[in-house]
Amino acid sequence: MQAFMKQTSTRALLLATMCVSSAAVGCKQTPNATATVPVASVEAAPVITRPVRVSDEFNGRVWATDYVDIRPRVTGYVDRIAFHEGQMVRKGDLLFVIDPRPYKDAADSARAELDRQHAAADFAKIQSDRAARLKLSDAVSQEEQQNRSSDLLQSGARVKAAEAAVASAELNLSYTEVRSPINGRTSRTQLTLGNLAQADQTVLTTIVSVDPVWVYFDCDEQSYLRFQQSARHGNGVGSDNPVRVALANEEGFPHIGHLDFVDNALNPSTGTIRARVVLQNPNHTLTPGLFARVQLQSAEPKQAILIDDKAVLTDQDRKYVYVVGSDDKAQRKDIILGGSVDGLRVVKSGLSAADKVIVGGLQQIYFPGAPIKAKTVTMESLVAQSDKPAAAGIK
């Protein structure tokens, strides 16, 4: 037993000695290796500074200048539909026919009553003239003559009432033909043949005008104040200043109109004010209800800094670019962007005229302050390259 305990103690001592030796070996210091960051080869272009028209973009909707619910003015059954759904119609074109027979009979009856009243008036005139002649020889009394004169006046009034009844009956008869009040495009028919249409209630169809059209948009308070201040100095957006509009699938702003209305009050709940643009629409491409982008430009050019969109990076809700900093290092600058001018982006703030913006090789810059080797290019050359059509790979 004592021999076993002695052997175990010896093994423990040997194991402890080995651990101490291993720790000593592991604690041996080695020289620190300095990590080297590769130099990024990038392309940098000086910013462009030139006078441009400052522009702002807003979202809006296309609206029809005229929108009409077609309702009948008389009650009756739909006897005829004289147009195709979605058809372009002119003012005065026939759309629907309400069964005219009851109204034709009413008009004939009113005309017959008018003839009867004319005959009664003619007879009353004869009686009045006879009484006047007899009164000269005192063959009739004064009262009899006055009665004949009164009958003549009453007959004339009944003739006028009958004429009004004829006019009303003929008007109702004309209302059985429902015609377009405007030039525009029709919608679908709400009632088909044989259905009852109630006067001034039933909507038969709708018509919207298509040329010209309006584009309503909401201008934010800051932009409104800026344009208002510019207008006081004579270089803001006026009613005669062109306003450019684009649909959701269009590049640039191909449609040109003019501002013709600004609301009289700012909406305090949204901080915006509503305005309206008038656009000519001869090809009927601007359909009411479409989303539209509106670009407002100031009339007076202002000095602005322009860069290529390829240089702009995004960090959550912030936009930034890398510029060539001191000691050939990439320096980050947060910027605020404006509108587009000739393929370049306006920088409202964040850059100076002396900055060189990195436009190529951005994927090699992993952090601000990274070493770079910049090759100088121009912003114009980048725009020219982007405008070139891509070569077709397959015929």
Image (tube, grey):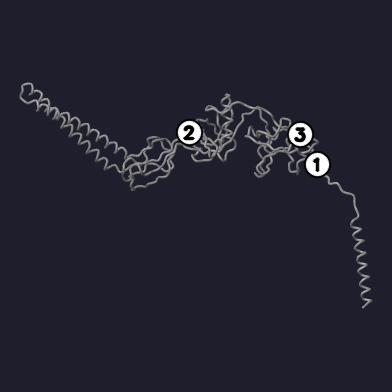
Badge 1 density bin: few <14, some 14–19, many ≥20, Cα 10 Å: some
Q: Where residue 376 is drawn, which disc sits there?
A: 3
Percent x, y of residue 257: 53, 31
Judging by the rendered image, the residue that carries numbered circle 2 is 212
Image quadrant holding the N terminus, namely bottom right
Residue 359 can be seen in this image: no
Q: Amino acid at mark 1?
A: Val
Name, please, the residue furthest toward the top.
136
Percent x, y of residue 331: 75, 38
Give whichever of 245, 180 is nearer the camera.
Answer: 245
Ranked by sequence position, the earlier of labels 3 and 1 is 1
> Where on the picture, by quarter, is residue 168?
top left
Give whichever of 378, 52 is nearer the camera.
Answer: 52
Percent x, y of residue 125: 14, 27
From mark 3 to mark 2, how far is it between C-alphas?
Answer: 49 Å
From mark 3 to mark 1, how far is it between C-alphas?
Answer: 16 Å
Judging by the rendered image, the residue that carries numbered circle 1 is 39
